Image (tube, helix red, strand yellow):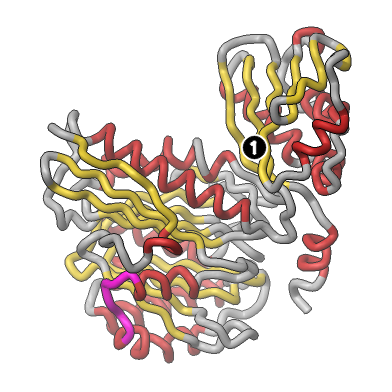
């Protein structure tokens, strides 16, 4: 086996250069759901069907499309022919009427795209608690069918249509060449607010949203895809936060068309998994970088933890602290807030063994402010668009990288006016 290439790129730069996964078509139209009048219904189809793996929100309050999609995947055993996405209405907290209207759109999509009803996976994003305009989605489907295509331009329209408060589309792709055969991955995501994904298996405990769609022409079963998707999500989408709010609609869906006939085996699994991980990480980073009102993207590198769980506990406590996030917005190197948040995180550690750095600047060492603390240098580091804060707990060998951001007045403005 020879691995000739394994790279990820932002499709915004390469949209007209690189091939997309074979076995899929994409399209989008304006259905009049968004008040802005922009693209708001997107469809991806697999004419020969695809095998799917999915992870949904762990929020106990879930939107109708999550409930319906979960049901469909159970019925088909993970077989998918069409993905139907609307933006501008979350179809959440809409009662039985929301379920019924979601089902109606799936029935109409099955008729339009010539597939079985249960092979349609619905997704919605937008405002919560507003009656779902199924009639607008259904009326738009013939136009979507006419607009379908397999070119980068079609994939780009799909990525644009799923946006809500996003300011730019979020797309990434990877190519892995194995024994002379190219396996392609394309990912499209949306999300800028209500971002603290806590994704889990589609079967089990059950506003703006994170939606992620991953497409590949690899040949793999649903069971195989699930084994790859879970770890990829855990180290990417489950390691980001903009505002600490977990959406009712969060979805990560991976579809494999099998068009390359390259199968997963002992030789191909590792390179494909690495490429999938890179695509997921790129999309996760793009989501935070385009967060509502974000001025600074901060990577929290927690090291020296007893377990990965405790490392993530510390990262989340810091990422969700309003005091830390507001300090980042003004580039204030107030390291005491970092230490305090770590202290209430629930992780066990001895403060006298902790070390903290902002960028390369040491600020706290072994129980007290370091004599080498250069406040001006730390402030300069924090004025950058992106930087890393490293906090070593001195307890073990586990670590976590968690991407988050500052909290600004612009974020408050956007969300104070979201429904009006």
Q: Report crowding for label 1: few under 14, some 14 to 19, many 20 or more residues within 10 A (C-alpha).
A: many
Q: Residue at x 69, y 35 (%)?
A: 316
From where the camera sits, is residue 319 visible? yes
Front position in the image: 213 or 295? 295
Q: Quadrant of residue 87?
A: bottom right
Q: Characterize the magenta stretch by its predominant secondary structure.
A: loop
Secondary structure under the numbered disc 1 in the rendered image: strand
- Across and down, in percent, residue 239 comes to 58, 39
On whether residue 374 falls in the magenta region, the answer is: no
- Across and down, in percent, residue 408 comes to 81, 55
Q: Residue at x 74, y 53 (%)?
A: 295
- Across and down, in percent, residue 390 comes to 68, 26
Q: Is residue 17 depicted above or below 347 in this figure? A: below
From where the camera sits, is residue 70 visible? no
Q: Is residue 270 depicted above or below 40 in this figure? A: above
Residues in magenta, as a range:
147-152
Q: Residue at x 84, y 11 (%)?
A: 367
Q: Quadrant of the N terminus?
A: top left
Which residue lies under the disc numbered 1? 299
Q: Residue at x 49, y 72 (%)?
A: 160
Q: Across the whole image, how many numbered discs are drawn on residues?
A: 1
Front position in the image: 375 or 239? 375
On whether residue 148 falls in the magenta region, the answer is: yes
Q: Quadrant of the C terminus?
A: bottom right
- Across and down, in percent, residue 56 comes to 49, 51
> Seen in the image, is 359 located left or right of residue 398?
right
């Amino acid at each position: 086996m020879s691995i000739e290439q394994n790279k990820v790129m932002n499709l915004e730069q390469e949209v007209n250069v690189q091939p997309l996964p074979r076995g899929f078509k994409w399209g989008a139209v304006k259905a009049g759901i968004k008040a802005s009048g922009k693209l708001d219904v997107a469809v991806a189809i697999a004419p020969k069907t695809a095998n799917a793996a999915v992870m949904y929100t762990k929020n106990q309050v879930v939107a109708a499309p999550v409930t319906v999609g979960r049901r469909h995947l159970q019925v088909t055993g993970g077989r998918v022919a069409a993905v139907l996405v609307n933006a501008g209405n979350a179809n959440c907290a809409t009662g039985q009427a929301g379920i019924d209207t979601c089902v109606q759109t799936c029935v109409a999509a099955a008729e339009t795209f010539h597939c079985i009803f249960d092979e349609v996976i619905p997704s919605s994003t937008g405002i919560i608690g507003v009656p779902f305009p199924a009639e607008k989605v259904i009326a738009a489907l013939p136009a979507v069918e006419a607009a379908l295509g397999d070119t980068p331009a079609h994939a780009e329209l799909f990525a644009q249509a799923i946006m809500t408060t996003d300011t730019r589309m979020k797309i990434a792709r990877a190519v892995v060449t194995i024994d002379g055969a190219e396996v392609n991955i394309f990912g499209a995501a949306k999300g800028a607010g209500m971002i603290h994904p806590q994704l889990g298996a589609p079967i089990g405990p059950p506003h703006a949203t994170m939606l992620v769609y991953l497409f590949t022409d690899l040949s793999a079963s649903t069971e195989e895809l699930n084994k790859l998707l879970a770890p990829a999500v855990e180290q990417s989408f489950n390691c980001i936060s903009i505002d600490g709010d977990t959406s009712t609609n969060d979805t990560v869906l991976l579809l494999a068309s099998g068009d390359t006939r390259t199968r997963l085996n002992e030789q191909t699994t590792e390179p494909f998994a690495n490429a999938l991980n890179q695509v997921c990480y790129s999309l996760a980073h793009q989501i935070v970088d385009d967060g509502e009102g974000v001025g600074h993207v901060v990577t929290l590198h927690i090291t020296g933890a007893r377990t990965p769980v405790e490392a993530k506990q510390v990262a989340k406590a810091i990422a969700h602290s309003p005091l830390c996030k507001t300090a980042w917005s003004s580039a204030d190197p107030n390291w005491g807030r970092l230490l305090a948040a770590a202290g209430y995180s629930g992780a066990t550690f001895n403060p006298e063994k902790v070390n903290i750095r902002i960028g390369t600047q040491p600020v706290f060492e072994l129980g007290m402010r370091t004599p080498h603390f250069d406040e001006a240098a730390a402030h300069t580091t924090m004025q950058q668009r992106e930087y890393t804060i490293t906090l070593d707990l001195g307890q073990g060998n586990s670590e976590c990288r968690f991407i988050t951001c500052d909290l600004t007045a612009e974020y408050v403005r956007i969300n104070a006016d979201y429904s009006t």
